[in-house]
Amino acid sequence: MPLKSIRTGRLADQVADQLKQSLFNQEWEEGERLPSEHELMEILGVSRVVVREAIRNLENTGFLQIRRGAAGGAFVRPMKHDVISNMIRDALRLNHTSVAEIMEVRLEMEPVVAALAAQRRSLEDIKLLEKNIEKNPGIKSGDNFVAWNVDFHRLVAKASHNSMYELLVNILMDITQDLILSIKPSRRVLHDATSHPAILEKIQRGDVKGTEQAFRKHLQDMIPLLEELEKKKPGKS
């Protein structure tokens, strides 16, 4: 959609909306530089202040990345889950969302996603899951162990080959990881060491029903520990 001159209304919002629509239409690819501020001013018929406000809004919402210097400018940012995840995490904190609520959503979603992974997984997906299990940090506490643990869930979602499920699972895993790291439990294991390999074996075999059941039990086994961690979270009485 060609950019159009703007005359009235909330100018910065209209500029941002037009630029977003151009991004949705893939008129600029990931990593590509947008027209300069001066060019946008000429095309849209607005001031530099309006253009800068619109660009800043798109930067804040994760659409653009601003680079400084002679080769700088506004560049199309690869769309990842982290920007959305940060907004949702803030909303959940404000609403005091509980572990029970988070796990209720995970129990409804992740077993279905795992079943799709068993049905659709590629050889590359299997290799990534195997590599994850092989890279077990060994020390069952700390940031590295938690990141390794949740990465398995992220990779299962990736293997489902459903971009919406992958996005939602990544957000849920960010929230779960946040909760665990806010406690930093020492000498605590989120679950036994055989859970992930057993799930991977079912995915490899293409056992759709078995994968779904194993993943559901895997999550159910985690609930008591996560609820215990929640009670110890700073600010909890």
Image (cartoon, rainbow, N blue to C red):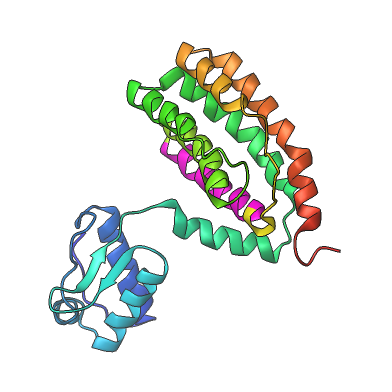
Give the quarter of the figure containing the C terminus: bottom right
Q: Is residue 200 left or right of residue 163?
A: right
Query: In screen coordinates, is 101 left or right of 198?
Result: right
Look at the picture and state if 234 lies above or below 110: below
Highlighted range, magenta: 163-180
Residue at screen point 65% across, 33% down: 108
Residue 100 in view (yes/no): no
Residue 72 appears in which quarter of the rendering?
A: bottom left
Specify the quadrant that holds the N terminus.
bottom left
Q: Residue shown at 27%/80% (left/top)?
A: 51
Percent x, y of residue 86: 52, 61
Q: Residue furthest right?
A: 237
The front one of 34 and 111 is: 111
User: Measuring 69% from the left and 50% from the top, which residue is drawn there?
Assistant: 186
Q: Quadrant of residue 49?
A: bottom left
Q: Nearer the viewer, residue 27 or 163?
A: 163
**Where is residue 95 shown, x and y percent of the image?**
71, 62
The front one of 28 and 42 is 28
Is residue 219 covered in magenta? no
Q: Position of residue 36 (x, y in %)?
A: 16, 76
Q: Main secondary structure of the magenta part?
A: helix
Q: Is residue 157 left or right of residue 69?
A: right
171 magenta-colored: yes
* Residue shown at the point (59%, 33%) measured from the top left: 110
Camera sees residue 26: yes
Q: Position of residue 53 (x, y in %)?
A: 34, 81
